[in-house]
């Protein structure tokens, strides 16, 4: 009788893992964030990887999908996880600043010159990340200000130009002269 009750309970309980269809549905739902700052400059492949990370985080936090989608204000929860994932991406690698400030836009705005090397771009985006860290309490507060258009564009413009003129972008080539 105990086995029968356990089998009945197991059959009636909700799955503790999302199905492929539920993951697909969540990834489809995440498309509404495609025009969000940072995400809008990703190519389709990068955005797909990003949505995989967000869906995996949500599934880890809420293993029962039916319970998750029934949460009041579920979209606020999804948005919070999207922003947290963006912050994690940028914290993991300052070069991810390129999604906020695409190189092509910086060249078009005459902030950076065309033809910069990968090493110079890495140094530039690291400098931008350092400037943001110096001017905002946290990366999350910067992203929230950026997304809601509350960012002081004067300070940000000065930071972008400061990094463009910083010593980290100057490439020095040494030439050894051998004399007889």
Image (cartoon, rainbow, N blue to C red):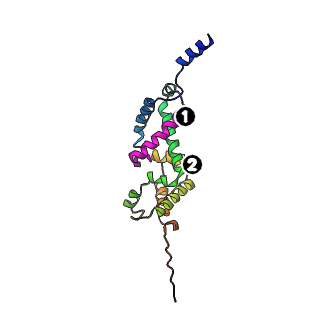
Q: Is residue 56 magenta?
A: yes
- For this rendering, which residue is in front, 71 or 162? 71
Real-space CA distance between mark 2 and mark 1, rounded to the nearest whole angstrom: 25 Å
Q: Is residue 70 magenta?
A: no
Q: Secondary structure at mark 1?
A: helix
The segment highlighted magenta reads 38-65
What residue appears at the point 52 percent right and 58 percent down from the top-left corner?
Answer: 126
- For this rendering, which residue is in front, 49 or 143? 49
Image spot of residue 32 (x, y percent): 40, 38
Labelled pair 2, 1 in contact (Cβ < 8 Å):
no
Q: Which mark is residue 3?
A: none
Image spot of residue 118 (x, y percent): 46, 61
- Residue on which disc 2 sits: 138
- Residue on which disc 1 sits: 60
What residue appears at the point 50 percent right and 27 percent down from the top-left corner?
Answer: 65
Lower sequence index among marks 2 and 1: 1
Residue 6 location, quadrant = top right
Q: Is residue 129 visible?
A: yes
Image spot of residue 176 (x, y percent): 51, 80
Of marks 2 and 1, the one in the foreground = 1
Q: Residue furthest bottom?
A: 180
């Amino acid at each position: 009788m105990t086995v029968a009750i356990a089998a009945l309970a197991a059959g009636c309980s909700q799955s503790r893992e999302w199905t492929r269809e539920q993951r697909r549905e969540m990834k489809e739902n995440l498309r509404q964030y495609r025009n969000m700052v940072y995400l809008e400059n990703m190519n389709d492949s990068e955005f797909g990887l990003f949505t995989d990370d967000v869906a995996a985080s949500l599934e880890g936090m809420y293993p029962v999908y039916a319970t998750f989608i029934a949460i009041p204000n579920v979209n606020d929860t999804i948005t919070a996880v999207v922003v947290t994932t963006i912050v994690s991406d940028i914290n993991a690698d300052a070069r991810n600043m390129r999604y906020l400030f695409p190189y092509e836009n910086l060249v078009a705005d005459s902030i950076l010159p065309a033809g910069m090397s990968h090493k110079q771009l890495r140094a530039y985006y690291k400098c931008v990340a350092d400037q943001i860290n110096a001017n905002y309490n946290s990366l999350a507060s910067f992203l929230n200000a950026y997304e809601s258009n509350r960012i002081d564009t004067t300070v940000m413009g000065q930071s972008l130009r400061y990094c463009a003129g910083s010593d980290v972008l100057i490439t020095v080539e040494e030439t050894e002269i051998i004399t007889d």
